[in-house]
Image (tube, helix red, strand yellow):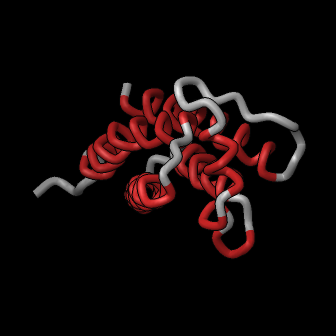
Amino acid sequence: MLRPALAALSIASAAAMIYVGAYQTRQIDRLECPAFGHGCEAVADAPFARPFGLPDGYLGAALYVGVLVSLTRTSRRARGITFALTIAVAVSNAVGVLDMARFGAWCFWCLVTTVMAVPMLVGGLRWFRDAAPAR
């Protein structure tokens, strides 16, 4: 039951970030932003939204796809990779929230993925701990 839940959260988060990335690369002209007006576009166009010169929407989507790929294996090492990726997801989302707070605008899609990052992190830890050798 844990693996399907982690996969569903990863798929939903990846879809949201691909949507943001599509706007950042102008594959789409407008980024709908429930609850925050033009906040999503302002955040997506902000300087902090392009770490290493790359759209953070696509970078985030790559992390979520990494989680999905790591879930296809059940070895202890693969479970450790899954947990490490969920830590990266949580940290990157936390940094994003701090950046948005400093910037003064909010992205609905980014906040949704941030909320989903919490159960992903807990699930990643449980997934890893379930593979621990018996003592």
Q: Position of residue 56 (x, y in %)?
A: 65, 58
Q: Which of the image's four quarters has the N terminus? A: top left
Considering every residue shown, the one lying at the far bottom of the view is 52
Front residue of 34 and 89:
34
Q: Establish if 112 lies above or below 127.
A: above
Q: Quadrant of residue 114?
A: top left
Image position, residue 18 (x, y; %): 72, 42
The residue at the point 71 percent across, 55 percent down is 45
Q: Is residue 8 left or right of residue 125?
A: right
Residue in the image at 52% along x and 34% along y: 7
The C terminus sits in image quarter: bottom left
Q: Residue at x 53, y 49 (%)?
A: 67
Count the labels in the image.
0
Of residue 44 and residue 89, the one placed in the foreground of this image is: 44
Left or right of residue 61, residue 54 in this image: right
The spot of residue 39 in percent (x, y) is: 60, 40
The residue at the point 47 percent across, 28 percent down is 4
The image shows residue 31 at horizontal and vertical percentages of 74, 34
Residue that lies at the very extreme toward the left in this rendered image: 135
To which quarter of the image does residue 133 belong? bottom left
